[in-house]
Amino acid sequence: MKGCKGIAVGLVLAAVALSGSSLPQVIPHVPYAYAQDDWKKEFEEICSRTDDAMSFSREELKSLIARCDRLKTVIEQLDESARKVYLRRLQLCRDLLVFVLESKEKP
């Protein structure tokens, strides 16, 4: 089915190009900051940094946690199976970052 979606999108883009119209700036149901598969790059960027979490400052950890929260809204828009997998993985990354932040804030 995914191949059919890709073909359909390609046909729509071709029709728009031939008609001379411009494409909308925002893809429906996806926040502007994460068009198409950009969310996957953000996901990998955040979760790949958990190995070094103890070396980050409090501000860096807070920033990563905030990025997790923003990314969660994008992942919630995915189809059911992808949503379940990526939300769970993102939650695990976020939980680790929160744990490290809390451990750094304790006296």
Image (tube, grey):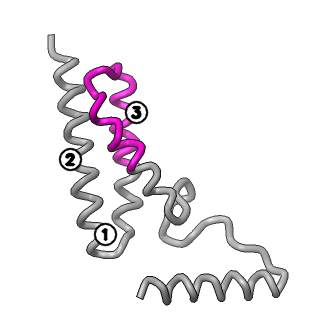
Category of crowding for the residue at label 3, using alpha-carbon neighbours closer than 10 angstroms: few (below 14), some (14–19), many (at least 20): few
Residue drawn at point x = 24 percent, y = 53 percent: 89
Q: Is residue 32 above or below residue 82?
A: above
For the C terminus, which image quadrant? Answer: top left
The three-letter amino acid code for the residue at tag 3 is Ser
What's drawn in magenta, residue-wise? Answer: 44-69
Q: Nearer the viewer, mark 1 or mark 3?
A: 1
Q: Residue 27: image x %, image y %?
A: 57, 69
- 9 or 77: nearer the eye? 9
Say which element carries label 1. Answer: helix
User: Any mark on residue 82, and which?
Assistant: 1
- Pointer 3 residue: 63
**33 displayed left or right of 76:** right
- 85 or 58: nearer the eye? 85
The three-letter amino acid code for the residue at tag 2 is Leu
Residue drawn at point x = 27 percent, y = 33 percent: 51
> Which of the 4 quarters of the picture holds residue 16?
bottom right
User: What is the count of numbered marks?
Assistant: 3
Residue drawn at point x = 31 percent, y = 20 percent: 55
Kindly give the residue lying farthest to the top in the view shown.
107
Category of crowding for the residue at label 1, using alpha-carbon neighbours closer than 10 angstroms: few (below 14), some (14–19), many (at least 20): few
- Cβ–Cβ under 8 Å for marks 1 and 2: no
Q: Residue 105: image x %, image y %?
A: 21, 18
* Main secondary-structure element of the magenta-colored stretch: helix
- Pointer 2 residue: 92
- 33 or 86: nearer the eye? 86
The three-letter amino acid code for the residue at tag 1 is Ala
- Cα distance in 3D space between marks 1 and 2: 15 Å
Say which element carries label 3. Answer: helix
- Judge whether residue 68 is colored magenta: yes
Category of crowding for the residue at label 2, using alpha-carbon neighbours closer than 10 angstroms: few (below 14), some (14–19), many (at least 20): some
